[in-house]
Amino acid sequence: MELHVTLALTLLREHHLLDHVSNLTDFTATSVSYDSRTVKKGTLFFCKGNFKPAYLASAKKQGAIAYVAEREYPEGQGLPAIIVNDEQKAMALLGAAFYGYPQNDLFIIGITGTKGKTTTAYFADNVLRQSTKQHSALFSTQDRVLGNKPEDRFKSDLTTPESLDLFHDMRAAVNNGMTHLIMEVSSQAFKKNRVYGLKYNVGIFLNISPDHIGRNEHPTFADYLHCKEQLMVNSRTCIINAESAHITDIYYAAKATTQPENIYLFARHGADLSLPDNQTVDFEYRKDLEDLHESEFELKAVSDKGHQLHLDHRYLTSVPGDYNEGNAVAAIIASGLAGAQAEDAVETLDHVHIKGRMEMLKTKQHGTIYVDYAHNYASLKRLLAFLKRQTDAGKVTVVLGATGDKGISRRPGFGKALNESQADVVILTTDDPGYEDPLKIAHEIDSYIDHDCVGEVQFEMDREKAIQKAIDLSDNDDIVVLAGKGADPYQKIKGVDTPYPTDMKVAKSYINKIEN
């Protein structure tokens, strides 16, 4: 991989990103990086994000051949300085060029939504791995899968990687023989231009509800919705959950760049819909069975273009929850557009397992423990409602916290969801507090809890002890819900990913101790 300065400058000019160049020389970059610790001889270095001038000095010392930034730095004296008006856009643009535009060799399915992205991604990945004979890559919140060897699968650091990492991993996937890619696309990916210039063969819009709104994320819900809608704007074919809030805005965002014949709408049979332009859905699904272990539903096409995909069938999924049926439908339609058959979905959807999503541990004396990533109002409300409906539980104990420095809007949302579910016991604890005091976060959540609706609220900032306390408080007919962290093996504390066993491991270890 390499990038000549002439091509770099041409691309930046074409996108109106180039301001000026200082100390210009004829160079060819043989490496690209935004991390001074990885710079080697011949690297084009990007001064982005939480950049400090000392990083550029280090990059220069280690062999950087030039740098890209929004202003010149004395620390880079003597190096060619490519000055741009948007560092993030420039990095995405030049990163794609350096890695040889790997997106052109992949059928890319992008997924966005406030909840359900990871579940939908895993559904689609399993179907496409079946239909492509294991030639499907995955970029998800949990895992990044670039090929079929053990070393090609690793833990994700971001839902949507930084642009240089994104195109690097796409190139690796292509080199590994992958032909398809399923990727979650966060609102922050568009907000921070990590995916600038990237086009998707299929874009999925699952849903939208207030989230990621706060001082370090989206300033308003309108900004959050706008960033989510950019997936529709940048997709050749769009799939939209017609039951989503703000459906008119979402549909028109899709229609701005996509012909109506390439926009697919789906909804539950009998759903009360209010669609723009007298639109009707292309697919309906009807629930046949639902319990704590699986969901069964029937999918039917109701439009001519829907019928052309030949996806009418009864499907069984191993991920329970009525809210996951819509995720499965979106994955089935997207996979059909990517060349999969209904039989591929039938053979795989009932074998999908997603760590941290509706994981269940049945105990002998302390009820049933559920671990789920539910981390905002909408997901927590639907999770608790589903469990109450399915379990006929005695006492319901919920353990949760809220992230620090971001997702500030989740705190009142948690209070609202707990009020509506009328949880019997709530234990507020730590969940990635960042630079904030977890106890202050917990008291903020508590300020939104109606104590006439919720039975009891306790505070325990050691998450492992909070889980143990919840188990101790539960008898055999009760349920314990460990919400928020899912399968995350760390706590983000003061800028450090501090190792944490995961909620399920903590629960299993404690149960083994007290019941065996």
Image (spheres, grey):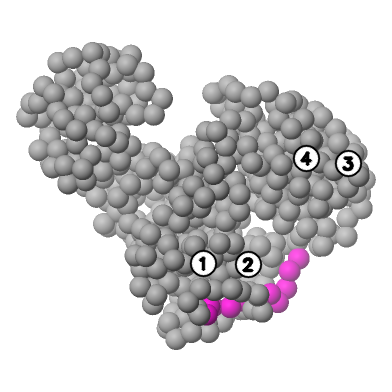
Q: Which residues are magenta?
A: 280-291
Q: Is residue 136 visible?
A: no
Please give the name of the residue rendered at 41% of the width and 54% of the height, measured from the top-left corner.
230
**Front residue (pair 425, 135):** 425
Q: Residues within 10 Å of mark 2 (few under 14, many from 20)?
A: many
Tell me which numbered mark, 4 or 1, is placed earlier along the sequence: 1
Please give the name of the residue rendered at 47% of the width and 81% of the height, measured from the top-left corner.
306
**Which residue type carries mark 3?**
His
Please give the name of the residue rendered at 39% of the width and 29% of the height, measured from the top-left corner.
49
**Front residue (pair 275, 437):** 275
Q: Residues within 10 Å of mark 3 (few under 14, many from 20)?
A: some
**Horizontally, is 458 left or right of 291 in the view?**
right
Dot 1 falls on a residue whose secondary structure is helix
Residue 511 placed where, x, y %?
82, 38
In magenta segment, residue 288: yes
**27 shown above or below 312:** above
Tell me which numbered mark, 1 or 3, is placed earlier along the sequence: 1
Look at the numbered discs 2 and 1 and tell me whether their residues touch, using CB distance below 8 Å: no
Dot 4 falls on a residue whose secondary structure is loop
The residue to which callout 2 is attached is 325
Q: Residues within 10 Å of mark 4 (few under 14, many from 20)?
A: some
The residue to which callout 4 is attached is 448
The residue to which callout 3 is attached is 451
Magenta span: helix, strand or loop, mainly?
A: strand
Q: CA distance from mark 1 to mark 3?
A: 37 Å
The residue to which callout 1 is attached is 248
Please give the name of the residue rendered at 11% of the width and 22% of the height, measured from the top-left corner.
23
**Which residue type carries mark 2?**
Glu
Residue 216 placed where, x, y %?
52, 33
Occupied quadrant, residue 134: bottom left
Q: Is residue 187 visible?
A: yes
**Which residue type carries mark 4?**
Tyr
